[in-house]
Image (cartoon, rainbow, N blue to C red):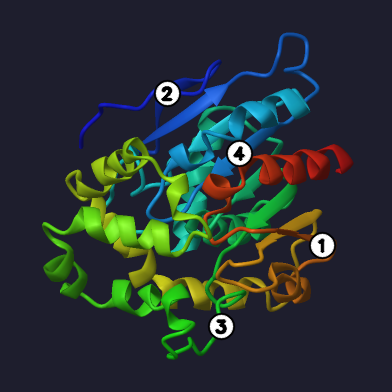
Amino acid sequence: MSHNLPAAPSGFSHRFATAKGLRFHYVECSAPEGFASVCPTIVLLAGFPESWYAWRKIMGVLREGTDCRILAIDLPGQGDSDRPQDGYDTQTVATRVHDLLQHLDVTRYALAAHDVGAWVAFPYALLYPNEVQCLTLLDAGIPGITLPSHLPTSSTSSWKTWHFGFHAVPDLPEILLQGRERPYLEWFLGRKSADPTVYSEEDIDEYLRVFTSPGGMRAGLAFYRANATSEQQNRALTENAKVNMPVLALSADQGSIPDMEAALKPFCQDIRGETIRDCGHFQLEERPEAVADAIVRFIRSC
């Protein structure tokens, strides 16, 4: 894959670490001097077709607002992390992310995640409840949890979730998208945003770089192709347990899931919800100030 990495936000650095044979890329800053021993880490996970880069406008605000160490991680198969051939069900991905955090000696942290990142974060919180201090889940159709069992087919609404079926079909997306990756990403990012002009040419270039790197498309689609397994895993995890740490469900008024709090409430012991106004699915890109404010207030309350 190409490693012409974009500049990290001021005060942050690109890092690589290998955990159980899998190399991860992440961007981090340490907690301010004097805070490292008492302040938790905030772990950030992004979605499709994005990477850590989706959090770039928010990371500095989170650090200033919480005095925490910040880790924005590229999931396996995402960004500049390794792209294994299998293991894209969300429980396996959650375990692999946990391997990285153990390797980095991160044992207590807040977790915030969007889209596919939230698919991973939900089972993660159930698997490691004694480590996650609080959980923020942004607009996401989490398999078996917030993803509707029947997706709409009307042309007025199907554009929000049609890609779940398309991405899951073997081979066809690769046939249709090969050589057309840029217009696909431009449509995907722009159509699902309330204001498509939030993406600069540089932003599209970065997401195109990782999507067209060797294995990039394959790995991105693999999360969707593992959805049925992820759904079964989530149903088993929630059969006799609920997420027991405080949860912030962050919806968008023009997002994919109309009410994240209502969808998540049956699975959480302590949940609160907020809605980002004038915002589509890509909350981190579209309304970074509002998202950062909500997360900072939530973490301070935990």
- Kind of residue indicated by mark 2: Arg
Q: In this image, 140 relative to 19: left or right?
A: right
Residue 249 x, y percent position in the rendering: 72, 60
Does dot 1 land on a helix, a strand or a loop?
strand
- Kind of residue indicated by mark 3: Pro
According to the image, label 2 marks what residue?
Answer: 15
* Residue positioned 20% across, 37% down in the render: 1
Upstream in sequence: badge 3 or badge 2 = 2
From the image, state whether disc 3 or disc 2 is nearer to you: 3
User: Which label was assigned to residue 43?
Assistant: 4
User: Which label was assigned to residue 148?
Assistant: 3
Upstream in sequence: badge 4 or badge 2 = 2
- Kind of residue indicated by mark 1: Ile
* Residue positioned 48% across, 88% down in the render: 152
Q: CA distance from mark 2 to mark 1?
A: 33 Å
According to the image, label 1 marks what residue?
Answer: 271
